[in-house]
Image (cartoon, rainbow, N blue to C red):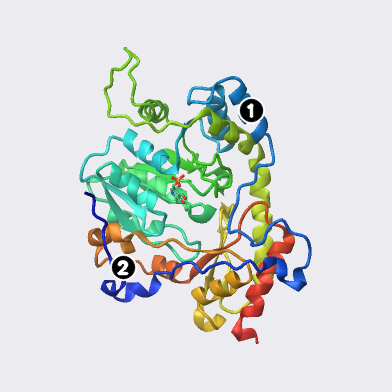
Amino acid sequence: MLKPYELKLEDMGDLAEIIPQADPEVKLSYRAIPAFDQPSRRQIIPVCEPTLGGNEMKYVQRAVETNWISSAGSFIRDFEARFAEAVGAKYGVACANGTVALHLALATLGLEPDDEVIIPTFTMIATANAVTYCGAKPVLIDNEIDYWQMDIDQVEALITPRTKAIVPVHIYGHPVDMDPLMALGRKHGIWVIEDAAEAHGAEYKGKPCGSLGDAAGFSFYGNKIITTGEGGMITTDNRDIARLAWNLRDHAFSQERHFWHKFVGFNYRMTNLQAAVGLAQVEQMPDFVSARRRNAAHYSRLLAGIPGITTPPEAPWAKNVYWMYGILVDAETYGMNRNQLRKVLADNGIETRTFFIPMHCQPVYWEQFKGQRFPVAERLCRDGFYLPSASSLTSDEIEYVAAVIRDACPSLS
Ligand SMILES: Cc1ncc(COP(=O)(O)O)c(C=O)c1O
């Protein structure tokens, strides 16, 4: 039987200090706040939720009425085309989720055991796992503190003859500095696969994420800027990658004859029902992106000047879509630490989520990266968390959340 990788906090040395406590229980007190005494459809403010206000029902109904509910209906093709167009790419390959979008994209490259793939340690576990599924080795890199993204300056030193790919992750919807990364990729003959799971509509120097690398993987999980419930997509301009990915996602059925397989393929298909939702969502993507940016600007205005709170950055060359509106808490300056502030927010009916736990601190990868340290990723993990970030968030809700953070600040009292 499969055994879990066990890692005890007491065996992690000083790294144990950055590991977040269990999430505080969110109290249903949001409605009860007198200063905010107006009808609300929610009792707590969730950290995220989907917005399904467009043609979702209409398109799903059409899929059901026409009997195309599996993975061969026309909504798949329409969604692939519309989403690829929205992110400035030639091809879209819809699949079951963002994790397998990355796995599929990497699988098309023909990685071999012991090949190396450079990824940031500060990411969601799926980035590292997609590399591991291919039998290749993730090689970790730290983030930079200015924009919280993979530190491009550290990449070249990590390149070896076994490096086959780099996977920059546009963390929380802010693009990575891609030009120097692409130049490195070209110089060394290394593929660059964007992990754009969180970056729908984000732009780097005016070009959309998803069109910057050799290919990209998106997620349409329920908390993403557009969603299909579960779902993902590869976008690429590379015809060979797209063709192989379409084939591999569908058991690698051969063109020559049925039930004839020349690759070890996967069933990573998306259903027409999901694509029906996806098409309705992509129609609304510009509105969702504007809402995220407007909400982020509102939050940042209200939180500015609270001692010890760092609001999310935006590089001069970036259009950040603030998939999640994350803040950092400097415990000494603010007067309490991240975990304590999260508890205050939870007691006021506000759900939050801590930043990612870096890959080198994960039980599954601990032995692989033991002894390696990544100070910026560790700081982000220790001090970072995100506030309610849905596109549907109202101005009043943002003002309420910001007021709780301001009122709770011991340094201001
Ligand atoms: C950076 C990143 N990569 C990959 C994924 C995986 O996407 P999915 O959950 O759709 O498999 C996520 C999901 O949240 C993510 O945040």
The reply to whether callout 2 and callout 1 are in contact (CB within 8 Å) is no
Give the residue at the far top of this rendering. Answer: 257
Kindly tell me whether mark 1's CB lies below 8 Å from ligand 1.
no
CA gap, disc 2 and disc 1: 52 Å
Is 341 on the left-hand or right-hand side of 134?
A: right
Q: Secondary structure at mark 1?
A: helix
The residue lying toward the viewer, choosing from 99 and 216, is: 99
Q: Amino acid at mark 2?
A: Arg
Is 190 on the left-hand or right-hand side of 278?
A: left
The residue lying toward the viewer, choosing from 42 and 155, is: 42
* Front tag of 2 and 1: 1
Residue designated by label 2: 373
Residue designated by label 1: 61
The quadrant in which residue 107 appears is top left
Q: Residue 30: x and y, percent? A: 68, 67
Q: Is residue 294 visible?
A: yes
Number of labelled discs? 2
Disc 2 crowd rating (10 Å Cα; few below 14, some 14-19, many 20+) is: some
The residue lying toward the viewer, choosing from 410 and 148, is: 410
Q: Is residue 219 above or below residue 343?
A: above
Q: Is residue 5 above or below residue 32?
A: above
The quadrant in which residue 215 appears is top left
The residue lying toward the viewer, choosing from 277 and 296, is: 277
Q: Which mark is residue 138?
A: none
Q: Residue at x 63, y 74 (%)?
A: 405
Nearest to N terminus: mark 2 or mark 1 = 1
Q: Residue 275: x and y, percent? A: 55, 32
